Amino acid sequence: MGLVEDLLTNRYLITPSAYYLLSDYYKKDFTLAELIKFAKARGAFVIDSSMAEEFLRKKGILSAGAPVEGGVHEPLEFGGEFSEEVSSTDENGAHVAPSGDSTPMPANVGEILALESRPGSGGGTSISTGTVSESTPVVPSSGGLEEETSDFSGGKSFVSTGTAGAGVPHEPSPGETAPEENEVEDSSGGTLPVEREGYVEEAQEDVGGVESAIEQPAPEESPSEVSVPEASIENGNGYNGNGYADSEEYYEGNGNGVKPKIVYGDYGVPIAYTAEEVPEEEKSYSVYRDVVITPKEGFHYRAKEIPDEWEVAFDVKNVKFEVPKVKSAASKEGEIVIKVYADYFRSRLRKMRRILRENPELGSVIDIGKLSYVRGEDEVTIIGLINSKRETAKGYMFEVEDNTGVIKVFINRNNSESKKFFQIMPDVVVAFKGRYSGRGIFFANRIFLPDVPKFKRTKPPLEEKVYAVLLSDIHVGSNKFCEKAFEKFLEWLNGEVNNRKEEELVSRIKYMILAGDVVDGIGIYPGQYNELEIPDIFDQYEALYNLLRNVPDHITMFIGPGNHDAARTALPQPGFYDEYARPLKKLKNAVMISNPAVVRLHGRDFLIAHGRGIEDVVNFIPNRSHHRPAEAMLDLLKLRHLAPTFGEKVPIAPDPEDTLVIESVPDLFQAGHVHVMEYKIYNGVFLINSGTWQAQTEFQKMVNIVPTPARVPIIDVETARLRAVVSFDQFCEGV
Ligand code: D5M
Ligand code: FE
Ligand code: ZN
C-alpha cells in the first residue's frame, strides 16, 4: 500500500506537498511507524510539508541546512515536469498529486514560494518553521537545530497552536505562512469546538504579565525558542516521551500556565476540551460565583420536618427501546427509515386506542380494513390517525388510517360534533362513530377526542401542607435574563420574606420544578449572539449551578431540558448532554429529568414538559395564541399528546415508542416555552404555564411575544392547585 493509504488506515492525513517530499523515501529510508510516531509527538493528525521536512532532517535524509531539492521549485515554471516526477516516484502518486496536475493552484504556489525563500533566510533555522519568510522578524538569526531543540522543554505542538490562539507567540501571522499551511492549520483548528474560544480568550486575558515568566525563556537568551517553538518537537523531551504515546488524551501547554486537556475522538479530531478553572475575575462576564446567599438566621423551614415523598414516575431515559433489526446487510436504507416511522406511529396508535377505548360511549370498534364486512345500517366506531383534513361544501372530510387501511370520513356541518374538526391537528388519533356507506366513505355522526375523564378520583389528603414552586425558561446567559429578580427569589427562598403569609409559603416549599430552557444556549435564534451575556455554553451551566446551589438543601429540584438547552433538539429530550451540563451534577438536591417526564409528589402526578407542542397548536388550531398558553395546553391534553404533528415546527424523533403520548391523566400539567404565566383547570387537571425569567428579547419583539417574567407560581401539592403567585418582576429590567 502507498503512503497515503497507510496513513489513512492509521487515521492520519497528508498534504500533497508533504507526500511529495516523503514518498520517495517511504519504506526505503523510513517506516510508517516512525512517521506516525513523529506526527503523534507533535499532536498533529495532518502531516504537512514543514513536518515532512523536519522529519526528513531528523532522519538525516535531508541535511539540516539544505533546502529541499530543486525539483520543488520547478512547478511554477515547469508544471509538467513536476507532475511527471510525482507519478514516477510512486504508483499511488495519482491519488495525491493534484499538485502535479494543476501546478498553479494557489496552495502549492504558496508553499513553494515559502520553500524558495528558505535558502536565503538564515540557513537551517528557518527550516524548523517551514514557512517563515526572509523578511519575517521572528526568524532566529543564529543557533542550529540541535541547539534549539535541546533548549526546549515546554514546547507547543501543532495542536496547541490552535488551542492557544492568536496571543501565543508561535502563531504565524498570515504573512508568514504559506497558504497551504494556513489551510491545514485551519482545518485542524476549525474542528475544535467553538466553545473553546471562550476559554482561549479567557486564557489570553489570564496571561497578563506572567505569561513570559512561565513559558517563555527571555528573548535575549534564546530568541529562536520564542520565535520558532515548533522546533521543540524535535527534542524529544517535550511530549513525545513515554507519557502519552499510546493515549488518546494529550496535555498541551497553552502559553499561560493553564494546561487545557484536549480529548481526541475518531480520526484524531479533538472532541472535548476541559481547562483548569480560570479565575472568574478574568472573564468579561460573571458566572455568579459571587452569588452566595446565606439562609436567614433562625428561619424555620417546616418542610425540613416533612418526610420526602417523591419519585420520577416517568422518564424517557428509562424507556427501553427495541431498535428495529436490519434483515440483512443488503437491506436498503430506505426500508429501515420507513420501518422506523411506521413503528413510531403504530406505537402512537396502540397507546391512543387504549386511551380512547376507556370511553364507554365508543361502542364497538372495528378495524378500517374490515369495514366492508359491516352492514350499512350498523353503527360502528373506527379509531385512526388523521392523515389530513379539509373543509367541503357540506361539511368536513378527513383521511383516517389505522394498521389495516385508510378511509375517508365525512361529517356534516349541521352536526354539532363537527366543530371538533378545528381541534383536530394532523397526526392525532381520534375515534369516529357512524356508518360505512360501502363506497369508500365513512359517515360519522360522533367524533371522540381522546380527552380526559370528567371526574377524577380523589386522592387521600396529606397530613401537612407542602408546596412546590414551578419555574421554566430561566435562560441564564441571556442578557435579558432577569438576574436581579432571580437573586431576589433565591433570597426569598432563604428566608428573606416580607410578611407572615410569605413566611408560611417559603417554610413549606419542598420541591422545585424547572421545565426547560434553563440556559439560553448558543445559536438558538437569529441574532442571539448579540443578546448573550455569557457567550459560552459551559459557562452558562456553570452560572446556573452557581445560582441554584443557593436553593436550600431540603428543596428537591427536578430539572429538565428545553429547546435552548444542550440536549437533543428533537422531542422527546432524554436529558442534558453530560459534558455541557456537568456543573448541574454537583447539585446534591437536584434530579435531572427528561422532557417530558412525570414527577410524583406525595402521590400526585405532575406532568412536566417544556411545551414546544404549544407552537403547533397555535399553528393549527384557530384562535390560539402564544399569549394564552393554558388554552393551547388544554388542546394538547384533550388530544393526549404533547406534540402530535409530525414534520412541522416541532421536530420529533421517531423512536420505536411514542413517549409523547399523555398516557395517564396527571393531576397537574406544567409547561413553559412560551414565556407567559397562565393557568386553567379542566376536569380536575390543573394546567399551568410557568412563564419565564427572561425579559423580552429582540427576536420576541419582532414576533410580538410579550413575556411575563419573574412570576413564581406556588403549588399546593395536596390539591395540585395554585396556592399563590409571587412576583419578582419589579426587579426585572425591561418589564
Ligand atoms: O421560546 C420563546 C418564545 O418564542 C415562545 O413563545 C416561542 C417563540 N418562538 C421560539 N422560536 C420561534 C420561531 N422560530 N418563530 C416564532 N416564534 C418562536 P424560546 O424557546 O424560549 O426561544
Ligand atoms: Fe424559553
Ligand atoms: Zn423554549
Image: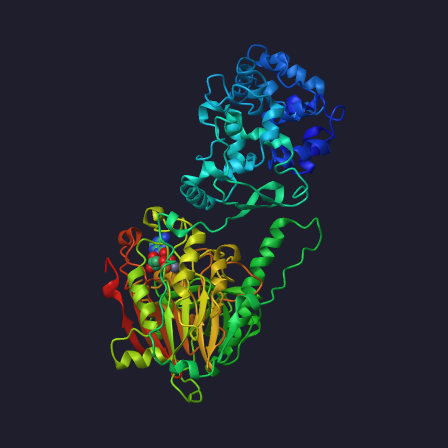
Residue 14 spot, x, y in % from top left: 62, 30
Residue 586 spot, x, y in % from top left: 49, 63
Q: Quadrant of residue 159?
A: top right
Report if residue 646 is visible in the image.
yes
Q: How many marks?
A: 0
Q: How is the image coloured?
A: rainbow
Side of 45 relative to 89 (left or right): left
Vertical side of 489 occupied by 188: above or below = above
**Viewer-proximal residue among 634 and 395:** 634
Residue 640 spot, x, y in % from top left: 45, 71
> Which residue appears at 38% of the width and 85% of the height?
465
Seen as rendered, the residue at the extreme top is 77
**Viewer-proximal residue among 156 and 333:** 156
Residue 558 spot, x, y in % from top left: 45, 69
> Which residue appears at 54% of the width and 48% of the height?
272
Q: Quadrant of the C terminus?
A: bottom left
Side of 567 relative to 85 (left or right): left
Side of 710 relative to 169 (left or right): left
Q: Quadrant of residue 731?
A: bottom left
Seen as rendered, the residue at the extreme front is 221
Q: Quadrant of the N terminus?
A: top right
